[in-house]
Image: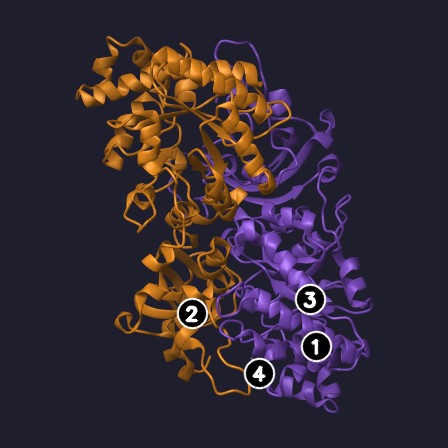
Chain colours: A orange, B purple
Amino acid sequence: MKSSDIPGFFAKAEDLNLDDYILLDYYFECVGDPKEASAHLCSEQSTAQWKRVDVDEDFRDEFGAKVLQLEIKDKLNDISYPVQHNAKGDVYACYAKIAHPHRNFGAKLPNLISAVCGEGTFFTPGIPIIKLLDIHFPQSFLAEFEGPKFGISGIREILQVHDRPIFFGVIKPNIGLSPEPFSKIGYQSWLGGLDIAKDDEMLGDMEWSPVSERSKLLGAARKKAESETGRPKIYLANITDEVDRLIELHDTVVKNGANALLVNATPVGLSAARMLRKHTQVPIIAHFPFIASFSRMERYGVHSRVFTKFQRLAGFDSIIMPGFGKRMMTPESEVKANVEACLEEMGNIKPVLPVPGGSDWAGTLKLVYEKVGSIDFGFVPGRGIFGHPMGPAAGAKSINQAWQAISKNIAIEEYAKTHPELQTAIDVFGKN
Amino acid sequence: MKSSDIPGFFAKAEDLNLDDYILLDYYFECVGDPKEASAHLCSEQSTAQWKRVDVDEDFRDEFGAKVLQLEIKDKLNDISYPVQHNAKGDVYACYAKIAHPHRNFGAKLPNLISAVCGEGTFFTPGIPIIKLLDIHFPQSFLAEFEGPKFGISGIREILQVHDRPIFFGVIKPNIGLSPEPFSKIGYQSWLGGLDIAKDDEMLGDMEWSPVSERSKLLGAARKKAESETGRPKIYLANITDEVDRLIELHDTVVKNGANALLVNATPVGLSAARMLRKHTQVPIIAHFPFIASFSRMERYGVHSRVFTKFQRLAGFDSIIMPGFGKRMMTPESEVKANVEACLEEMGNIKPVLPVPGGSDWAGTLKLVYEKVGSIDFGFVPGRGIFGHPMGPAAGAKSINQAWQAISKNIAIEEYAKTHPELQTAIDVFGKN
């Protein structure tokens, strides 16, 4: 790039119609001039060759991504992680805000992802290290997405639960158990007070547990539990499968009594999820496999909140995400950013239920509640319910008892003295 | 995990029916005992709770992933990249080969990805740093995939090119040019000797360039170029779009004369690509957006060759990948591993055409040819053809001239003396 080419990739926000642009927050480490590197970053992700060889024209004004802000944060001795590259020179750690015209890709998730996390972002000359930290969409772009059909309010309406978090539980053993005993375990957890009994994200439509059979048994068990407890319940069936089976599986399991669907969002593909959203009669809930592979490094890849926003665009009603437990190896600020990305105003796109999870049990509920800062979240133990020595009903009871203690502002250890299920949970799970 | 639980996640290869297992090669850095960490790695990705609380049973034999080999490579002072985690103790750098029973997920790409790159892999207690390096499939698993419909031999058959690499070119300007001038540029490149003129991976079905209109013009231009040159040509149309439009777009653009389809594999989703494969009448070619986000770190994420293999399973006939140029920031060994993953024997899955690309022009052809080590590759310049000062026909000619020089074992500088298109390419692109 010639130095005279660089200004064509810079603009002032006030000179643009921002409704035509998505905004991208990048951290990057460049070798050499940050201004030139950020111009390259724009060029590579938009109109890399902005004119024909023999024609006097310039596509940058209409189609070029543009640097709105560039902040040189630090001068480094070397890039933060070793990467094969040939640029030589001083290394600068930078933040850039880039405006990318959405006419370049349209309101289509695969094209959006290609534009902002694609070759342009990761193969910019002079930028070996880069992380897409955040993304912001204008109204005109959001308006073209359907967004969640149910969202938080829809899920609360189904369950008739308005004054506390939603209690999920992952039925365990997750892999290997046939539908009949599996459904018994789910049934018991509902009797104990669970709202949503769910398939593990690894449990799909398996030969040893066909989801048609599983959903029939769980659907019937759910209805039985509803009539016995007088409370609405949800069986969350995992229909993660090849894309061309999603609609058929939706129809089968919903007919059988599943009243929410689990989909591993990134492995199935966000666009396939959007297709399912257009068809679904019940809430669809995202699980997080694969996202850590590109989001865990502090300074490289894509921040997980970007994918939380993509999942809202795709139309998920709730998003299961790595939670606060240290076991989940996710900084608290990142979990909070993801919770916020579920709840914040986003034009016509409904707020969705964040479910920060990982090794939870009755004793971790208070911490999650405090960190989320509201009752608008799902709580999703596995072993904390289904590994409870007194059985899954007692496991579910222990969660409800923990919530009662929190509501009454009583320490759970105190409350446990008169609530044996909670006491046993503390004895067994409280030791780690 | 109790120490008595660990042996249940170890096995000897000779004691297993390996046709029931996929094999996974992992690098990881664990804090504490590597044996326990690798047992956790197996547990987390398969049957994390392998029995009901009140039943004497053990699902590990049938459903557990199992460590076949564990090699402690090094003791480190700290993990290679900072990660939030709570494990304390000595840090070991390890390689592990794990056998994962495919009955846990079946011959379904989203479920396979969830199993091997999911929560289990990236959220194993004691393993903050991990990279899935390679994956190997048994015959029984491969047999359930359709694989590529055309593969290398099918693409060569269409083009009637059997004795040299396949010459692709990315029509530029990539973004912003309307269909009519865009088609003229493609037409000229075919006249100059290009085999495949392609849409950029960022150029989808846009308001300012509807793919239906573009494919009509390019389809007609292709046929004109074929009759004028007497050679078959391919117009590679980018139909990257929402999943529920892929089949419709296939039908439209193929009817209009596109005779191969470009799909951004990871953004669209591998399973959606497999759906398209079942329907397609023409070769489908993968582009690589997003893959670098999880594959660039040497010791974290997923090696790109794993995704090359996934793309073969999905049924792509050719895979465009980051190539040898330093600009692509990819180690030579990684590019070679990806080329190899396209070409190596893989049961019933046909070999596919590798297209290692990035800032190529006539002068880089020899290097790519030597590094690939055979003629079975595609060569894909952009500016090296469409930024050639004498125009796209001359740009395409310069590539063919470079190949003639290589075949005749003449240095291109020498050959250029009597071939002005090549000489101009050297003058303009040979300076970097």
Q: Which corner quadrant holds the C terminus of chain A?
A: top left
> Who comes first in sequence, dot 4 or dot 1?
1
Q: Earlier in the sequence, mark 3 or mark 4?
A: 3
Q: How far apart are the alpha carbons under marks 4 and 1?
A: 26 Å
- Establish if A76 lies above or below B300: below
| Subunit of label 2 | A
Q: Quadrant of residue A157?
A: top left
Give above or below for B223 relative to A280. below
Q: Amino acid at mark 4?
A: Lys
- In this figure, which residue is indicated by the disc labeled 1? B190
Horizontal side of residue B176 vs B391, given as left or right: left
Inspect the image, locate mark 1, and give the three-letter code of the amino acid beneath it. Answer: Trp
Front residue of A392/A243: it is A243
Determine whether the residue tagged by mark 2 lies in a helix, strand or loop. helix
Q: Reading the chain from its start, which is encountered first: label 1 or label 3? A: 1
Nearer the viewer's eye, disc 4 or disc 1? 1
Mark 2, residue position? A42
Q: Disc 2 vs disc 3: which is toward the camera?
A: 3
Secondary element under disc 4, as helix, strand or loop, is loop
Question: What residue sits right under mark 3 in the picture?
Answer: B257
Q: Are marks 2 and 1 on the same chain?
A: no
Q: Are marks 4 and 2 on the same chain?
A: no
